[in-house]
Image: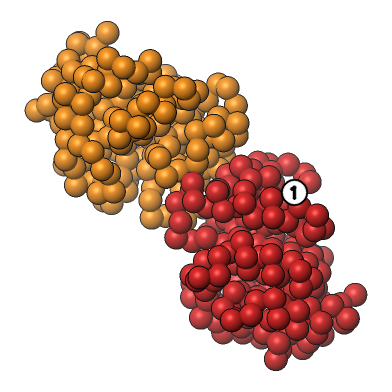
Chain colours: A red, B orange
Amino acid sequence: MKGIYLVTDPGLCREKSVELTVADALRAGVGCVQLREKNSGTRAFVETAIRVKASMAGFDVPLIINDRIDVALACGADGVHIGQDDMPAVLARKLLGPDKIIGLSVESWEDVEAAQELDVDYLGVSPVFPTTTKTDTKTVWGLEGLSRIRTFSRHPLVAIGGLDLSNARDVILAGADSIAVVSAICGTEDPYGAAKKLCDTVNPIIK
Amino acid sequence: MKGIYLVTDPGLCREKSVELTVADALRAGVGCVQLREKNSGTRAFVETAIRVKASMAGFDVPLIINDRIDVALACGADGVHIGQDDMPAVLARKLLGPDKIIGLSVESWEDVEAAQELDVDYLGVSPVFPTTTKTDTKTVWGLEGLSRIRTFSRHPLVAIGGLDLSNARDVILAGADSIAVVSAICGTEDPYGAAKKLCDTVNPIIK
C-alpha cells in the first residue's frame, strides 16, 4: 500500500462516472483504488465493482471494497476496507482467506492498540485532518497523532481525511505510506490531472 | 419452507429485542426466521445474527439473512433472502455453495419467469396485499396473482405483505407454502401469542 490511494464517491464523481474516474486515476499512477458506495443497493454495488475490476486488468493496482465482503467476493476484488462498525477483522479474515488485503480504520488510540494483534494489512488513519466527505468519525489525528501511530504500529499506514496537494508531502513525512483521497480526485473537473499532481508529489518521497 | 415465516424488524420489535421476539416465535412453532436489518451497520447486524443463531440451537428452524451474504457467512446462517436489487441469484449461489437456502423476491411477472431457471429454494411473493412495512415494492399480487404463480412456478412460495390471522388461511389455500409476517408478530404486545395463533391456523392446512 504505497503512494496515492483513491477512494471513490459516486456523489462527488457526478456526471463523470466512478469507472471513468478510476480509469483516469490509474493512468495517472495511483497505487490503490477503493470503491465506497454507501447509498446503493447490493446489486448496483456488485455491478459497478465487476465493471471497475474488469477495467483494472493490466494495472498492478489492487481493488479494495469498502465494508462489503460479499461484494468483494462477488467481484473478485483484492481486498476490503473495514471500519470499526463494519465486519470484525477476525471474521473478515476468516471469510476472505489469508491472501486478501484487509485494511482497518483506526479512529482512537484504543483502535490502534487493538489493531496491533489483528491480521490486517494496513491501518487507515482516519481522519488526519477535518473532512466533509465522512462525518461519522471521532478523533482528528493531526500530523502528531499520525507520527505517534507510526512509532507504535507494526502495520503500513494509509492516511485519510482532508488530504490534498497542499498537505500530502507533510503527511508522508509524518509517517504515512499512502495518501488516501476522495474529493481531491473525485470532486475535481480533471481527475487525471489532479491524480497526476498528487502522484508526482508523493511517489518520489515514499520509501 | 412451510408454515409461519417470521421476518424481524428491529424498529417494530422496539423494547422487546429481536432475540426475544425470535425466541417467542420459535416456542410458538414458526417454521423459518429471517433477520432483516436495513438500518444497522455491518458489525451490529453480524453481532445480532450471531446471537440469534446461537439462540436457535435445538430448533430445527432455518435462519435466513436478508440481502447480506457476508453476514450470512459470518454467522453461519442457513441461507439468505435476496430481492431483485440485491446480489444476483447466480452470484449468491456461487458464494454460498450448493447447500444453503436462497429465497428470491418476485415483484413482477418477469421476475417469476426469470426465477424459473434460477437455482433458488423458494420465491417470496411480495407483496400479496398492500403493506406499510415495505414501501419499495411494485405489483400487489393479490390472491389471484399468487394462484397464477403457483400454477406456473416450480418453486415453493412464501407469501409476504399484509398477511395476518385474518387472511393467512386464504393465502395458503391460494397456493402459498408459507406465510411470512413482520408486523403480525413483531409489532404486537404478545409475540408468542400472536405467533401461536398464526401457527395454529396455518400448520393444520399446509401439505
Where A170 sits versus A154, above or below?
Answer: below
Q: Residue pushed farthest left?
A: B166
- Mark 1 neighbour density, 10 Å: few (under 14) some (14–19) many (20 or more): many
Q: Residue at x 53, y 52 (%)?
A: A45
| Letter of the chain that mark 1 sits on in the rendering | A
Quadrant of the frame with the C terminus of chain A: bottom right
Callout 1 amino acid: Lys
Q: Residue at x 65, y 76 (%)?
A: A191
Q: Is residue A119 visible?
A: no
Is B26 left or right of A85, judged from the image as shown? left
Q: Position of residue B132 (x, y in %)?
A: 19, 47
Quarter location, residue B9: top left
Query: Which structural element holds mark 1?
Result: loop
Quadrant of the frame with the N terminus of chain A: bottom right
Q: Position of residue B30 (x, y in %)?
A: 30, 24
Q: Is residue B69 visible?
A: yes
Nearer the observer, B156 or B38: B156
Q: Position of residue B70 (x, y in %)?
A: 55, 43
Nearer the observer, A7 or B15: A7
Where A100 sits versus A142, above or below?
Answer: above
Nearer the observer, B59 or B31: B31
Is A195 left or right of B153, judged from the image as shown? right
Q: Position of residue A154 (x, y in %)?
A: 82, 65
Is A129 left or right of B175, judged from the image as shown? right
Q: Residue at x 75, y 83 (%)?
A: A197
Mark 1 = which residue? Answer: A100
Where A164 sits versus A14, above or below?
Answer: below
Where A184 sits versus B115, above or below?
Answer: below
